[in-house]
Image (cartoon, rainbow, N blue to C red):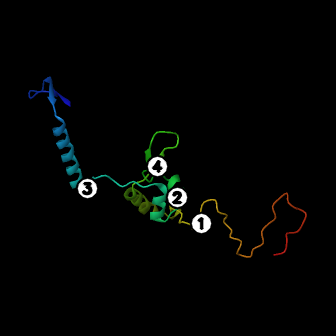
Amino acid sequence: MHLRRSVDKGGRMQSTRIKLDPQAVEAVARRVVEILEQRGLQQRELVDAAELARRFGIERSWVYSHAIELGAVKLGDGPKPRLRFDPQIAARVLRRVGGDAAADPPARSGKRAGQPSGSGRSGAQLLPIRGRGENQPPPAA
């Protein structure tokens, strides 16, 4: 590996080459990692939208619709890259949102996406579907 310096001690432009062997590069890299870990900047945890939603008890769709605010990291550069989230960043955002009732994230409903909202157990009579016996009264329950 070659590094170039462009200023000498007198402030004049000068080109100097320094050759580093692989062991020196490895030693420098290890030391940088040590320093970052001491400062608490070690590798952060990234989770997907489903895991973030599970951890914070919110809807996955809300996570996706607020991905930018939650600090989403795009994996890949295609038309639909996978998104990952740092839970610590998301927690800070959610605490801020928690103070604004209008922006509160929706709580999980306990049902899966695409599942009908009515369970049919309430005893309420449903309206007939248009096109099917519009002139006929609804069947008795």
In the image, residue 14 sits, relative to residue 134, either above or below, namely above
In the image, residue 10 sits, relative to residue 92, either above or below, namely above
As drawn, the label of residue 60 is 2
Label 2's element? Answer: helix
Q: Which residue is mark 4?
A: 83
Q: Quadrant of residue 91?
A: bottom left
Identify residue type, mark 2: Arg
In the image, residue 53 sits, relative to residue 15, either above or below, namely below
Q: Earlier in the sequence, mark 1 or mark 2?
A: 2
Q: Which residue is mark 1?
A: 111
Task: Tell me where residue 78 appears, x and y as whole percent.
Answer: 50, 39
Task: Tell me where residue 74 appears, x and y as whole percent.
Answer: 44, 45
Label 3's element? Answer: loop
Q: CA distance from mark 1 to mark 2?
A: 12 Å
Identify residue type, mark 1: Lys
Q: CA distance from mark 2 to mark 3?
A: 29 Å
Q: In the image, 44: left or right of 57?
A: left
Task: Tell me where residue 129 appears, x and y as whole percent.
Answer: 81, 61
Residue drawn at x 85%, y 60% is 132
